[in-house]
Amino acid sequence: MLMHRRSGFTWVELAVIVCVLALLMAMLLPAVQQSRSGGSRRNICNNNLYNLGLAVTNYVSFKGEYPGYLEPLPTDRDREVGDGRASRVTWLVPLLPYIERTDIYDLYRSGDYLMPGARAEWDPRRVYLPILICPSAVVDGQSKAIRPPCNYIVNTGRADVYASAGDDDHAPYPNDWRANGVFLNHYRDGVALPADAPLVSISQDFITAHDGTSLTVMLSERIDAATYSFPPGQALDAEANLGFVWWPSASAQPPFAPPRPSQRINGPNDVMPINNARPTSNHPTGVNAAFCDGHTRFISQDIDYGVWCLLMTPHGTEANTPGEVELAPPGPANNYQYLRAEPLDEASIQ
């Protein structure tokens, strides 16, 4: 009698295989969806930065210089409002006409919202702008309604010093040097920037003539959003909220690192606000950044800190400590020699 060998699967075996495949799909699908969603959020953030960078470029083409991270904005009500609130605005306010929000800018210029009896809906400082929000960042609902957040920050060079701190042998000096960054303090408050201190501005031609617009970072992002419309009263706190800064590194040789872990990209939070003036994001491994020529790219959080300093300085060979009259000398605990002598290798930009 011939015996026939069974081929194929039984119904029970087939059911087991289907169940195993379904289980694997259930395990993999959330990871795939999260990956797609994360990529989409990063792309939206990158697009926001691109459009903001384009607005800055158009502003600079028209005005001839970059805005300050703090700007004076004269209003029609300046003679009637004595506390100066209307004339102290962030870098974003002068850009409003360049992101198609001239309506908000006109409200700022009118000053009507500061007058006694002004209605809340006249207050331009409370307008929420989606272009200023990274979808990967967490935005508190209350701050969204009261103090509209901004997840994008500007390159402010070195941390500012008080321009009034000059000694008797020197005239007051600028808060920061032109070679150190792009967005500098333009608001004279009589303390951090008195009337007799030099007001420093930077033009596109200056950057082009030195380190180049494609190698000078303009904007980046931060998770813990500050507000674009209510800058802190102290100039140093305003810089810590609105910008990112660089510090001389902890050594004179690569690999370079900042003096404190919090000062590098995606570094941990520090108790001192100015030590948190660095790009951060919820995107895996790095942050989005826009450059002065208008292009955007993703910057790794593991980029060598010396390279990051070179990207922030529009004229690295003249990078200097704010408040110093002469160029601060290179030493064993800083990277000034590297900044002043090392050409930037584009391959080192991660």
Image: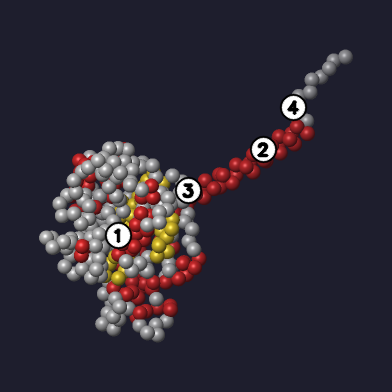
Q: Is residue 188 visible?
A: no
> In terms of sequence position, does the residue under pointer 1 or pointer 3 come before the other?
3
Task: Say which residue label 3 marks.
Answer: 39
Give SS at disc 2.
helix
Q: Is residue 322 visible?
A: yes
Task: Say which residue label 4 marks.
Answer: 8
Q: Residue furthest front?
A: 168
Q: Is residue 36 left or right of residue 254?
A: right
Q: Amino acid at mark 4?
A: Gly
> In terms of sequence position, does the residue under pointer 2 or pointer 1 come before the other?
2
Q: Amino acid at mark 1?
A: Val
Give SS at disc 3.
helix
Give the Cα distance between marks 1 and 3: 26 Å
**What residue is shown at x 16% (from left), y 61% (from top)?**
167
> In terms of sequence position, does the residue under pointer 4 or pointer 3 come before the other?
4
Give the Cα distance between marks 2 and 3: 26 Å
Nearer to the camera, 26 or 232: 232
Which quadrant holds the N terminus? top right
Task: Say which residue label 2 marks.
Answer: 21
147 up-or-down from 49: above or below: below
Q: Are marks 2 and 1 in contact (CB under 8 Å)?
A: no
Q: Are marks 1 and 3 in contact (CB under 8 Å)?
A: no
Q: Amino acid at mark 3?
A: Gly
Nearer to the camera, 296 or 1: 296
Task: Say which residue label 1 marks.
Answer: 56
**Residue count near mark 3 (Cα–Cα under 10 Å), binned few <14, some 14–19, many ≥20:** some
> In terms of sequence position, does the residue under pointer 2 or pointer 3 come before the other?
2
Measured as percent of width and height from the top left, residue 257 is found at: 33, 43
- Closer to viewer: mark 4 or mark 3: 3
- Closer to viewer: mark 1 or mark 4: 1
**Residue count near mark 4 (Cα–Cα under 10 Å), binned few <14, some 14–19, many ≥20:** few
